Amino acid sequence: MIKKFGNNSSKKKLVLIHGGPGMDSSYFFPFLTPLGEHFEVITYDQTRGSNIKMTDLMTQLENIISSLSDSEVYLLGR
């Protein structure tokens, strides 16, 4: 699931990559709210499951970044 919030008219996009298998991005929301004044913040929940490979996760991220080709993209990971 992809969620977007913040300054959606900004050409600066901040993509959050959350940590750990089985986690989602919700624990970051309180800290990201101030960044929404300067960026459109994009979060997504990585595919879960025991058979997920790193290449699958990279493909997900590449697809999101590719969809933002007309923007400055920043990554924030934990």
Image (spheres, rainbow, N blue to C red):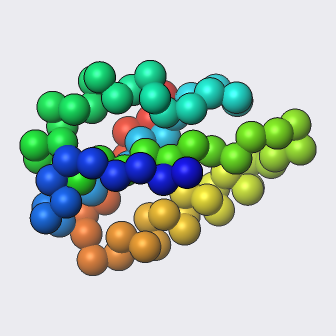
Of the pair 12 and 8, the residue shown nearer to us: 8
Q: Is residue 58 left or right of residue 2?
A: right
Nearest the viewer among 6 and 38 is 6
Residue in the foreground of this view, choosing between 47 and 75: 47
- Report whether residue 9 is seen: yes
Q: Is residue 74 visible?
A: no
Name the spot of residue 74 as percent of width and height, x first.
Answer: 31, 51
**In the rendered view, does 29 fall on the left or right side of 21?**
left
On screen, residue 1 above or below 33 = below
Left or right, residue 41 beside residue 78:
left
Residue 54 spot, x, y in % from top left = 73, 47
* Quadrant in the rendering for residue 32: top left
Q: Viewed as shown, does residue 29 lie left or right of 48?
A: left
Q: Residue at x 29, y 23 (%)?
A: 30
- Against 7, residue 16 (above or below) is above
Q: Residue 13 in the image: state x and y as whole percent.
A: 27, 56
* Residue in view at x 74 percent, y 40 percent: 48
